[in-house]
Image: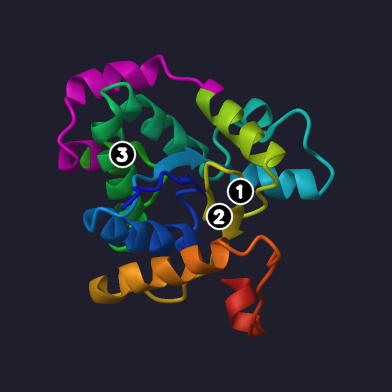
Amino acid sequence: MTVSEPTVYIDFLCPWAYRGAMWLAEVEKAGRIRPQFRFFSLSQNHAAHEGHAQPPVWDRDPKAQGLPAFLAATAARAQGAELGDRFRLALQRARHQDHLPVDQHATHRTVAERAGLDVARWETDLKATDFTTLAREHEEAVRRGVFGVPTLVWPEGRSYYLKITELIPPDRAVPLYDAIETVHRFGEVIEIKTPESEGTLAA
């Protein structure tokens, strides 16, 4: 069986991205995928929709919502892909399971410890980290047509934006992925939508 390597765009602020990441973690455990997580700033996306795409939010307001979390995760990547991804997942859990403030340094340090990073090195790397990685990955996402998170982009170019209202039980994770992959084979299908309640849209 071929192991797929979708690119997955996330923002640490987003509960949809958190639930999607938890689901994909189970699919990865089953040996079906090797997802590559990338950054997409909802703060920049909202600014762009309001006509303020330039200069980007990370140049205008480096402390804008969600941006310090991206810097912390970028610094974690300096210790390798595995540790970087462990930090990414742990920070999503800290925000959405533990309800810790996602942009505070104390949260980031706690997450670095939980993820098994060399915390002293991470602190040093963080001081030298800028928004170059976020800018590159966000701009790449925009070129690919990404408008929200999580968005999964397969190597051949097809992509899906996904909303999951509850955490997917482990025994249902792979069946859900199989269902989406089945639709993925039909290039004629470009959109599937369901009616959404006002509460769902506002989440």
The quadrant the C terminus occupies is: bottom right
The residue to which callout 2 is attached is 149
Residue found 50% across the figure and 20% down from its top: 130
Give above or below for 57 relative to 154.
above
The image's colour scheme reads rainbow
Which type of secondary structure does the marked residue at label 1 adopt?
A: helix
Point out the frontmost of discs 1 and 3.
Answer: 3
Residue found 35% across the figure and 73% down from its top: 175
Observer-nearest of 192 and 18: 192
The amino acid at mark 1 is Leu
Name the disc covering residue 85, or none: 3
| C-alpha span from label 1 to label 3 | 20 Å
| C-alpha span from label 2 to label 3 | 17 Å
Magenta residues span 111-132
Observer-nearest of 195 and 182: 182
The amino acid at mark 2 is Val
Q: 158 left or right of 68? A: right
The residue to which callout 1 is attached is 42
Does the magenta portion include 179?
no
**Residue 132: x, y in percent?**
55, 21
The amino acid at mark 3 is Asp
Give above or below for 79 relative to 94.
above
Residue found 34% across the figure and 50% down from its top: 33
Of all residues, the one furthest to the front in this rendering is: 1
Q: Are marks 2 and 3 in contact (CB under 8 Å)?
A: no
Observer-nearest of 131 and 32: 32
**Residue 135: x, y in percent?**
60, 28
Binning the other alpha carbons within 10 Å of mark 1 as few (below 14), some (14 to 19) or many (20 upward) gives many
Which type of secondary structure does the marked residue at label 3 adopt?
A: helix
